């Protein structure tokens, strides 16, 4: 029997593979086509996931296939234009990767393009489907640590890259409170990019929510970071969260109470939630209106550094404050030489092997790229 929903993927890179796995694991979805300009990558992907059709051009694919579900798995700067273009073909839903957009303007345009055409739009913050994170959210909401005061986490490899997951996770665990203000510090002394977007060398941001709770993110300040670990401090206890475990300490717990809720593949759950939403379910856990609030915080972290003051929401700047700060000469580069910490994704397999080997030896991306003359 034919599956109920016909899905396509735009971009056959590393994250496109996870979307393919997610669709395969969810019920009632057939991955019928992919769009990818790189012929070798497209061919290998089609073979691996048994996808019947492949296109070099995503609009040609959308025109010919008229799919129900569209995954946008390309680099950040393509998320807004490709989502807006895909909405024209009125699929039932679009699942676009994070970060939703670079600047809030793109996010607003994506929402408008989709909502005005009856297209549901979700963003790939798939970690919202970790059972442990949901357990932490439930514990915090139930008052297991009294009133949550502060959630903290360490991130790295760019605020827009991994930091988007971290900010989104902190919001999720606190029950998605509305943001009141953001205050930050940002350093950029090298000409650092991530997937073609100018980024900081390091930064930190303090986020104040309307309910009085706060979140603190530090990014690229230490080598020891992971987007998986969170610490929630409440008036009467503490919750420690990882991708699989939740630890609770409060006046009743007699030491750490360790919980391990059953792990479910977040990519499959994300795809299942899309189907539930399309079939009339109430919202998607990663829906665009939530992700837009995460984008606003990320942009406010940059804007606060740009203005040297607390940014009160709503954020007025709709562009990308990092680009604006650089153009205004506010972040002079002291070590010239543009480099992109994700450019290795474009390397052929042999080059990628060499890059990964040097990375394993502890060399920094910038030095490796210099060695490889990239
Ligand atoms: N949700 C997550 O946990 C997670 C993890 C990693 C990456 N991502 C996000 O996924 C996105 C893609 O990252 P990636 O690591 O998969 O990159 P990648 O380089 O591995 O894959 C991107 C692919 O898109 C293709 N592409 C480029 N232009 C295209 C076009 N016009 N039409 C169709 N395909 C095109 C490229 O050739 C490449 O194969 C990024 O925005 C990244 O932030 C999300």
Image (cartoon, rainbow, N blue to C red):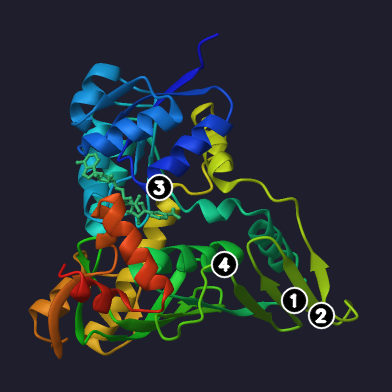
State how far apart marks 3 and 1 are (Cα): 36 Å
Asked whether mark 2 lies closer than 8 Å to ligand 1, one says no
Of the two numbered discs 4 and 1 on the same chain, state the one appearing first in sequence.
1
Rendered location of residue 175, percent (x, y): 59, 62
Which numbered disc, 2 or 1, marks the residue that appears first in the sequence? 1
Percent across and percent down for residue 344 are 28, 60
Q: Which mark is residue 250?
A: 2
Give the residue drawn at x 75%, y 81%.
237
Image check: 340 left or right of 254? left
Q: What residue does disc 4 label? A: 228
Quadrant including the N terminus: top right
Quote the CA–CA distance across marks 3 and 4: 18 Å
Q: Is residue 8 visible?
A: no
Identify whether 313 is placed above or below 106: below
Q: Which residue is mark 1?
A: 145
Whichever of labels 4 and 2 marks the residue nearer the N terminus, that label is 4
Q: Secondary structure at mark 3?
A: helix
Q: Would you say the beta carbon of the disc 1 residue lies within 8 angstroms of ligand 1?
A: no
> In the image, residue 253 lies at what x, y percent?
88, 76
**Residue 110 in view in this figure:** yes
Q: What is the distance, in whole Å, between disc 4 and disc 1 at their CAs?
A: 20 Å
Marks 2/1 in contact by CB < 8 Å: the verdict is: yes
Residue at numbered disc 3: 15
Say whether mark 3 is within 8 Å of ligand 1: yes
């Amino acid at each position: 029997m034919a599956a109920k929903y016909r899905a396509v993927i735009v971009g056959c890179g590393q994250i496109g593979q996870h979307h393919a796995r997610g669709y395969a694991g969810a019920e009632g979805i057939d991955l019928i086509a992919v769009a990818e300009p790189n012929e070798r990558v497209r061919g290998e992907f089609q073979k691996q996931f048994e996808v019947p059709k492949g296109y070099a051009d995503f609009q040609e694919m959308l025109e010919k296939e008229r799919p129900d579900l569209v995954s946008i798995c390309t680099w950040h700067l393509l998320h807004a234009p490709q989502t807006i273009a895909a909405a024209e073909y009125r699929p039932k839903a679009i699942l676009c990767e994070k970060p939703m957009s670079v600047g809030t303007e793109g996010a607003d345009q994506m929402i408008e393009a989709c909502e005005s055409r009856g297209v549901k739009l979700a963003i790939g913050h798939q970690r919202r489907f970790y059972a442990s994170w949901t357990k932490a959210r439930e514990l915090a909401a139930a008052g297991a640590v009294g009133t949550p005061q502060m959630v903290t986490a360490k991130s790295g490899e760019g605020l827009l890259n991994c930091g988007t997951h971290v900010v989104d996770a902190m919001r999720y665990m606190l029950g998605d409170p509305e943001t009141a203000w953001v205050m930050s510090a940002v350093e950029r002394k090298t000409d650092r990019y991530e997937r073609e977007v100018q980024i900081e060398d390091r930064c930190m941001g303090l986020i104040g929510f309307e309910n009085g709770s706060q979140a603190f993110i530090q990014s690229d300040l230490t080598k020891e970071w992971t987007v998986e670990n969170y610490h929630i401090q409440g008036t009467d206890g503490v919750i420690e969260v990882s991708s699989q475990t939740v630890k609770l300490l409060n006046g009743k717990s007699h030491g750490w109470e360790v919980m391990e809720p059953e792990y479910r593949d977040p990519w499959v759950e994300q795809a299942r939630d899309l189907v539930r939403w399309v079939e009339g379910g109430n919202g998607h856990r990663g829906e665009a209106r939530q992700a837009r609030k995460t984008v606003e915080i990320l942009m406010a972290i940059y804007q606060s550094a740009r203005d040297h003051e607390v940014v009160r929401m709503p954020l007025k700047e709709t562009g990308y404050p990092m680009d604006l700060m650089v153009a205004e000469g506010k972040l002079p580069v002291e070590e010239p030489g543009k480099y992109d910490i994700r450019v290795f994704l474009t390397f052929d397999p042999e080059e990628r092997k060499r890059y990964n080997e040097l990375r394993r030896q502890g060399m920094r991306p910038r030095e490796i790229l210099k060695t490889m003359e990239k």
